[in-house]
Image: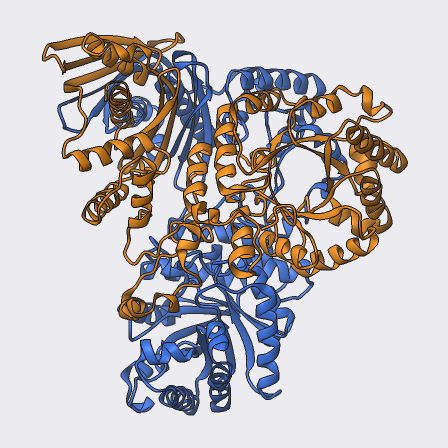
Chain colours: A blue, B orange
Amino acid sequence: MDRDAFHVYDTTLRDGAQQEGLNLSVADKLAIARQLDGLGVGYIEGGWPGANPKDTEFFRRAQLELELEHAQLAAFGATRRVGMKAADDPLIAALRDSGAGVVTLVAKSHDRHVELALRTTLTENLAMIRDTVSHLRTEGQRVFLDAEHFFDGYRANRAYALEVLRTAAEAGAEVVALCDTNGGMLPDWVSDVVVDVREALSPDGARVGIHCHNDTGCAVANTLAAVDAGATHVQGTLNGYGERTGNADLVTVVANLELKLGRHVLPEGLLRDATRIAHAVAEVTNVPPASRQPYVGTSAFAHKAGLHASAIKVDPNLYQHMDPIGVGNDMRLLVSDMAGRASIELKGRELGFELDQDLVARITKRVKEMESRGYTFEAADASFELLLLEEVEGVRPSYFDIESWRVITETAGESEALSEATVKLRAAGGQRMVMTGEGNGPVNALDHALRQAIGQAWPEVAKFELIDYKVRIVDQGHGTDAITRVLIETTDGVSSWVTVGVGHNVIEASWRALLDGLTFGLRRHNA
Amino acid sequence: MDRDAFHVYDTTLRDGAQQEGLNLSVADKLAIARQLDGLGVGYIEGGWPGANPKDTEFFRRAQLELELEHAQLAAFGATRRVGMKAADDPLIAALRDSGAGVVTLVAKSHDRHVELALRTTLTENLAMIRDTVSHLRTEGQRVFLDAEHFFDGYRANRAYALEVLRTAAEAGAEVVALCDTNGGMLPDWVSDVVVDVREALSPDGARVGIHCHNDTGCAVANTLAAVDAGATHVQGTLNGYGERTGNADLVTVVANLELKLGRHVLPEGLLRDATRIAHAVAEVTNVPPASRQPYVGTSAFAHKAGLHASAIKVDPNLYQHMDPIGVGNDMRLLVSDMAGRASIELKGRELGFELDQDLVARITKRVKEMESRGYTFEAADASFELLLLEEVEGVRPSYFDIESWRVITETAGESEALSEATVKLRAAGGQRMVMTGEGNGPVNALDHALRQAIGQAWPEVAKFELIDYKVRIVDQGHGTDAITRVLIETTDGVSSWVTVGVGHNVIEASWRALLDGLTFGLRRHNA
């Protein structure tokens, strides 16, 4: 692959970080940059040195600490200020001195934005672009240009928008990236504009790039449309992070280019790490990954097998648009309420068990019976694995025997309610423990009491943490007959697993899911 | 608008319900159908009567309880079984007798699927389609056909895939919907196939429809590409629910068609309720809404104003791709919520209050403050009405004063947990009551204790019953910092109402929702 032939340009650290609720420390940014390099992107836009102290620090530390194998850093910043010389503008100096291999300048290309937001003339805006690009080129920098609000600007004043691009290209900008900053475009429109832009620029002029947002739900398709029309530089963010509806999801764009369109835009083989990398970055940003995310989502290759399980066994490719290994993901069969023997068998194999026909029959029967009582194993892989182990090994993994538990929640007047739980059990060592835990909710209190009670025998549980809790009334019998289902997600800091509990009493259902959660975690850590 | 000119066909209740972790009760389905009708979709696919007992029940109750203004129901099912007469197949009879206005038959159009999954010959598959469509037409039904795995089938055996469509059309199917069942298509490919299909079908033959999944992140763009190529029937789901990466998000598709492409596909004005409806449905499914969802996401028009605040004030349209009022959303400049003055005013009017501007401003402020603490009023109309009454009348309706409450849940060994609640309060008459209630869950126990304690003063509460209970963790702080939101539905046997409670403690949040539930019911019965 010729890396120069096509630019994969990531802006997670700059434009992605604009997402509501997303806050990245310098250490977070360095960690994400390493992941991006592992994916093999060509360019990593790190932020705006000079304008943002955190970004200045990022570029400083990046020079010392980052050893990038595939990517170059890009420093993002604006053109020189109105009425100043580029050489005199300290913000331009900060870009020049950031140590990044590329400077990406953002420039206004929509006439109204020049007048209203920049408060200057159209002519001065062009001069700012020309001066800044020329100056940085003279100083030996590679320069890319982000033409902000380009598509809206093109509609409002095509001649001026094109003049902005021409000015930048003639001054030496290597890339002119067309930004759909407000995100309102559709693929055909993008395509038409890119074709027109390429005709307007001299053939040996700048490379055309594309930068899309997802406001019409078409960020990926818009990016592909631009590439089809001749763009050879695509910008996007990991997991589609970004302001409003987000930016184009770079992994989806790249997977489509590589796997659907046969364009080799990443170093050979690296796309196979995409799922791991997308999830690792989600851990850093602390934004829960979207299970329905294309290619890398946990549900992206999940099937409610049911009637089709036997056909899936014969030829899985009849039921998936590609082999998930291409992006490092896996086909998953959901044990659903249409669970048939074939899907149990497949599921067992996924977990590493070759089940004989008797065992498959027995497990299928038991799953059906439990599902009729309100259980679901679709999301609760860990509870299913415990059930499987119990059937395979003849005994359910067990690390403690519960004697009893109790939880009290109370309040007086307007003060906040508090919960207090007492758990009595014997842990593996045989010693009887009576522990009381408090919490701002009954399940929290139970979790605390339980982990204290078994913590002496099994210190691993100190690392476990309850990170998600979902409750659902499954059998809408009237009032008191209703059955409650609880799903609990537990983490050990590295991975997480989901367990299920069912009962008439929400606290009891939660308790059962808690027990499974700890049992599964202990099994994983002690096997 | 001519509703016949274009079909907006929703399959949330059938294909959307295939989403991992999504389980809809019959009551949920009826509630979602009402919302879909409010959005003005033309068709609501309700499920597979005859094959699935829950769906049979849905269609039975729909006939009795649903009064649809805009939509017709569609019953989904397969073609007759191999080697049977359509007239003798009880599953076909169930489709015919469901009471739905349309029967949508799914048929295999990929040769390998016919052989492997259906285990029959290509000829028999065509006969199954012909017989089933003809039979249902003879019985006076409108018939649509979903050509499953159409795009993959077209690639594998174009002639056969087209023959499937022709057979259905000639037998009287009104629509042939091309399904990208595995979701691997890109817009240009869809476009080419739709053009070819339209040429292959006789010009006065069936209407061409499109059904896309989001596996390449292009479900919306693929749907638009099909429409551009001549499809006049689009299928999708609310919030893009569906297997794997989900189906095409119907709201995004429709908003693009109406607001970007000028196609009028919904009854005038109804798209303005899209945001409210998308969120109300998310409450029913208990799937947290995606804040980055195009058009209706809470972040879809959110701006970190910063530098641009003044320019945004001068001309907000410079910074948004459309006016969010078109989909009932709001521009947000600060980290805040969804509530806008217009929607408060509208909701007030809906509840029978003409609010003056001061009152609207005050209520908006209060709602925003409460939403920032985790409240939602999208689904909890009754709690909102109580808040409104408090602001309009200067005092919140109140029928009792709580002194304190406590609830204990305990178990020993394997026996079922039981809960016992004690409530101390003064009811309207002034008498102090101390009552203990039992229940198989803490909320039930509290409900029993509370209704006993106020039952002497307000005997109406004996009729009230808690019929639904939903819990969601809204602020996913780690473990103990999380905020819990509870929605409770209460009935008096005639109608029902939903209330909301929020707190760090799930029991306390439930308690608040319970109090609102009883207060609202008493207000309704005593006013």
> Looking at the image, which is closer to me, A301 or B99?
B99
In the image, residue B27 above or below residue B385: above
* Number of dots carrying numbers: 0
Residue B299 place in picture, x, y as percent: 38, 53
Q: Is residue B106 left or right of residue B34?
A: right
Q: Nearer the viewer, residue B300 or A439?
A: B300
Compared to B48, does B413 lie above or below? above
Residue B214 in view: yes
A431 is higher (above) or lower (below) than A101 = above
Q: Position of residue A149 (x, y in %)?
A: 44, 72
- At horizontal 23% and vertical 46% (from top left) the residue drawn is B360
Residue A443 is drawn in which quadrant?
top left
Q: Tell me residue A323's x, y (percent).
A: 67, 48
- Residue B235 position, x and y percent, is 62, 44
In the image, A246: left or right of B53?
A: left
Q: Quadrant of residue B377?
A: top left
Residue at 61% from the left image edge and 49% from the top image edge: B2
Q: Which image quadrant is residue B508 in?
A: top left
In the displayed structure, A255 sits above or below B140; it is below
Q: Nearer the viewer, residue B433 or A245?
A: B433
Give the residue displayed 35% in from the left and 77% down from the top.
A98
Q: Is residue A3 visible?
A: no
Is B57 left or right of B436, judged from the image as shown?
A: right
| Nearest the eye: A226 or B192 | B192
Of the 4 image quadrants, the one containing the N terminus of chain A is bottom right
